[in-house]
Amino acid sequence: MGTKNMGFILGLIGFLFLDGLLLCMAREVHHYDFVLQEANFTRLCSTKSMLTVNGSFPGPTIQARRGDTVFVNVINQGRYGVTIHWHGVKQPRNPWSDGPENITQCPIAAGTNFTYEVILSDEEGTLWWHAHSDWTRATVHGAIIILPAVGKTYPFPTPYKEQTIILGSWFKADVMAMIQNSIETGSTPSNSDAFTINGQPGDLYECSNETTYRLPVQSGKTYLLRIVNAVMNEEQFFGIANHSLTVVAQDAAYIKPINTTYIMITPGQTMDVLFTANQNLNHYYMASTPYVDSGIRFPNTTTTAIVQYEGNYSASSSPFFPTLPSNTDIDSAQNFTNQIKSLASKEHPINVPKNISTRIYIAVSLNRLLCVNDSCDTGTGDRQAASLNNISFATPQIDILQAYYSFYLVGTGPGNYNNVTDPLSYNLVDPPEVNTINLPRNGWAAIRFLADNPGVWFMHCHLERHSTWGMDTVFIVKNGRYSNQSMLPRPAYMPPCS
């Protein structure tokens, strides 16, 4: 009896080991070539040359499975140095390939190349990549789709089809020339001339209705939209006319499903959204419009795409339009955000830090800085700035290492933070695990994370103008006691600083 039991135990151990080995072997290595190059694009009745990856806007999609490794060879045939950042990828122990310019590396100079090693760990869902040099991300960005590991499935019914939806900004002017002029003169950067869905402004802009993006759907089928907000400076409300949405993931982490008619998505965020084509055969607008919670000037325009039912029918003269919250509807924005909670299931657990060893308080603000000898072309003698704890970050000329962290949003609210009463309302059961959050104007947010990824990492506002003005900082996480708590060795080649 004892021998049989021992044999069963050994057999079980062998099976588990073999199963683990098979799963390990199933993790794949992928290779992509990204060629940075100028290409001509026509939008809003005018044509301009702009920096792209492989000549496309948005850029190519990277697809892999949970735990895979992706090597991306970036070949810079553009006019200036650029880096690429893998937004939301945790890069365990591998800050060398994270990408922000002069944080983890110096730029990839024109005429040279650099290969990034993108190490996926527990991310699952949709993330994105983008340039991280000045405002180059306006035209250099694309999606990262991370499927479940081999043998695993989604924690929701498998959709009939999936489609990536990238929200973007379009500037008629040369973006790099515009931001350089803004930095030199102290003037506020220009607003975008349009928003886009998958690179197209849509019917409501001039010279755009024939190129509007269209999504063909079959009646009765369910679709998964992988939505990326690559807009430069504005949060967005998004919806589809007459259709309900079910949000199932944010920032490559599953959440408890949210049934809604709209989403509010911040620049840098990603959301996975299900919708079923259950309306009458016709055509319906999906639309995205800016949300702002301050009195600043913003581009009050709407980008559209068309959900087009397949089949024989007489379509209405114009697609149905979704009802979205107004541009300044703070309550609708906060009501949506407050519904987001981690799935926190047995298959997709979370690990919220409960014993806090270090507390950091950061005041986020916009400021004005005096210009030396009235050197700013603003008419007021000062220029716009932004700060964290009243310090504006100045990007160094040599690289500081950056690693990437996700964190738990355990609380948010209006007014000044009260460190006695506000923690009583923290969600420590199923807070969302995210990499980008909406910080309410005149409000607060509390996040928690475990500092278990050695390196130097960059925390910054993803409204690009705020980041340009200095709303950034750098955290340093030292190596641990053991080798598996230390950074991987420096690669043999890193782009030189010059």
Image (cartoon, rainbow, N blue to C red):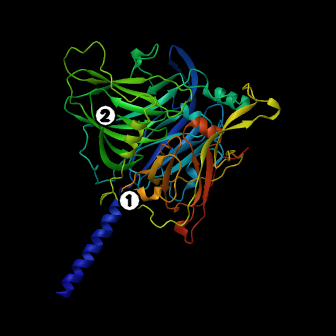
Which is closer to the viewer, label 1 or label 2? 2
- Tell me residue 295's x, y (percent): 55, 30
**94 over 497 or under it: above or below:** below
Does label 1 or label 2 sit earlier along the sequence? 2
Tell me if label 1 and label 2 are in contact, CB under 8 Å: no
Q: Secondary structure at mark 1?
A: loop
Dot 1 amino acid type: Ile
Residue in the foreground of this view, choosing between 414 and 251: 414
Residue drawn at x 25%, y 73% is 12
Q: Is residue 465 left or right of residue 170?
A: right
- Tell me residue 435's x, y (percent): 48, 48
Circle count: 2
Q: Where is residue 171, by image quadrant?
A: top right
* Mark-to-mark CA distance, 1 and 2: 28 Å
Mark 1 nearby-residue class (10 Å; few <14, some 14–19, many ≥20)? some
**404 over 319 or under it: above or below:** below
Q: Secondary structure at mark 2?
A: loop
Quadrant containing the N terminus is bottom left
Dot 2 amino acid type: Thr
Q: Which residue is mark 2?
A: 261
The answer, for residue 492, to whether it is visible in the render is yes
Q: Which residue is mark 1?
A: 350
Mark 2 nearby-residue class (10 Å; few <14, some 14–19, many ≥20)? some
